[in-house]
Image (spheres, rainbow, N blue to C red):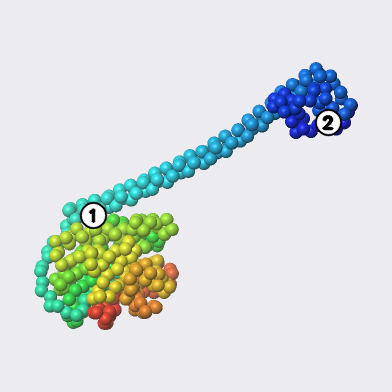
């Protein structure tokens, strides 16, 4: 047998050049050794027959190769399409989940609002009547905290006794003290800031055990107490403004990582007060155009005698480094940050911004005992003028 047979590429060029492209004019027998190796000298008929057979094989190979390429391209296209369909499917699921979540939130809010409406309609609530009063203009306003009431908690330990009845007594004594401070300074207007944890909620196991009333009853109870408090203040000041943010105790789910900012029950207090005090001409509930703005459920800004005060609860803003962050978020120079959460009165200054922290109504509860956190029931009243806080009063409630 001869040697040096042609490679596939050379063989293809000879066969296709002779039989298809007609670029080779050599006689068939002259191509024998080029195709089949030296010494393989076949006659023209044999060479031609073999070349046609080779042509058939070559064309079959190339058809298969094209098919493979085509199949690969089709597979790539199908895979790309499959990925797009998966993306669209996930997008649909995300949109559906977001829509369902929105429906649940609105349904829950509407249900809670209906419960409160029914409470106002059917409850034996005292009549709150608006009484116009004349207040002389002055150079200062009263800034009154109403922080961390924790209504609904039922505490009876060595250090403290606290329940709904005690809370009402505290509120009455506090009201008398606020009115007296306002009269002493001739304060013109009153700003009440309630920065969260109006109810005790059920975020800790120890709290859930000591809560005598469920959270809806807590909302109804504390809202009515605050409504009566504001109604009485309206008789002693030219205007009364109530501003608030949500706290951490009113979240619906105990797990703070799962809790949504929009699912905090403190927001219902403002809604209740707005309905209950709608006929009081000198009372403003919530952020109003001009002097105050509510950025979201965790933060508001209020202007008092030309100074901007920022209100937060404190669970997101515990460290002093957060003051600068609040300044940036407010997009305006801040004079002071108002907060609660830590259950004690304190006035300080951080990076040129005054920090005013008010205490709680609750005092020592079982959670404080377990965590070795000591706190007494107290609130904060500030006299504010064009220069800022002129003076302040720590008001004990027990």
Position of the C terminus by quadrant: bottom left
Residue 77: image x %, image y %? 55, 37
Residue 5 tag number? 2
Residue at the spot x=42%, y=42% of the render? 92
Answer left or right for 3 relative to 226: right
Residue furthest front as drawn:
25
Q: Is residue 183 visible?
A: no
Above/below status of 177 relative to 12: below
Mark 2: which secondary structure?
A: loop
Q: Nearest to the eye among marks 2 and 1: give it.
A: 2
Position of the N terminus by quadrant: top right
| Label 2, residues with CA under 10 Å away: few <14, some 14-19, many ≥20 | some
Image-quadrant location for residue 146: bottom left
Mark 1: which secondary structure?
A: helix
Q: Is residue 106 visible?
A: yes
Q: Which residue is mark 1?
A: 116
Q: Earlier in the sequence, mark 2 or mark 1?
A: 2
Residue at the spot x=34%, y=68% of the render? 330
């Amino acid at each position: 047998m001869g040697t040096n047979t042609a490679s596939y590429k050379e063989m293809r060029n000879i066969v296709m050049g002779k039989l298809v492209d007609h670029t080779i004019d050599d006689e068939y027998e002259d191509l024998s050794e080029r195709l089949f190796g030296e010494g393989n000298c076949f006659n023209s008929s044999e060479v031609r027959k073999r070349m046609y057979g080779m042509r058939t094989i070559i064309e079959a190979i190339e058809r298969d190769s094209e098919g493979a390429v085509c199949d690969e391209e089709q597979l790539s296209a199908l895979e790309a399409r499959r990925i797009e369909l998966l993306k669209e499917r996930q997008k649909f699921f995300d949109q559906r989940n977001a829509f369902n979540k929105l429906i649940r939130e609105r349904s829950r809010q509407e249900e809670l609002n209906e419960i409160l409406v029914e409470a106002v309609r059917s409850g034996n609530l005292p009549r709150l009547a608006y009484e116009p009063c004349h207040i002389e203009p002055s150079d200062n306003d009263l800034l009154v905290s109403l922080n961390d009431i924790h209504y609904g908690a039922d505490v009876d330990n060595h250090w403290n006794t606290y329940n709904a009845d005690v809370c009402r007594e505290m509120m009455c004594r506090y009201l008398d003290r606020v009115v007296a401070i306002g009269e002493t300074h001739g304060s013109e207007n009153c700003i009440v800031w309630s920065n969260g944890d109006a109810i005790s909620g059920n975020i800790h196991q120890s709290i859930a055990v000591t809560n005598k009333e469920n959270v809806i009853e807590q909302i109804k109870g504390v809202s009515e107490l605050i409504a009566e408090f504001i109604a009485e203040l309206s008789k002693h000041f030219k205007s009364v403004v109530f501003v608030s943010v949500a706290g951490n105790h009113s979240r619906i789910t105990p797990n703070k990582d799962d809790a949504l900012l929009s699912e905090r029950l403190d927001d219902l207090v403002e809604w209740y007060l707005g309905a209950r005090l709608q006929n009081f001409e000198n009372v403003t509930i919530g952020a109003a155009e001009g002097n105050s703005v509510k950025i979201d459920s965790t933060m508001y800004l209020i202007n008092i005698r030309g100074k901007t005060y920022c209100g937060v609860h404190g669970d997101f803003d515990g460290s002093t480094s957060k003051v600068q962050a609040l300044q940036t978020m407010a997009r305006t120079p801040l004079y002071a940050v108002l907060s609660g959460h830590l259950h004690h009165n304190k006035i300080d200054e951080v990076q040129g911004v005054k920090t005013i922290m008010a205490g709680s109504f609750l005092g020592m509860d079982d959670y404080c005992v377990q965590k070795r956190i000591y706190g007494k029931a107290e609130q904060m009243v500030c006299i504010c003028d064009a220069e800022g806080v002129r003076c302040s009063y720590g008001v004990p409630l027990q």
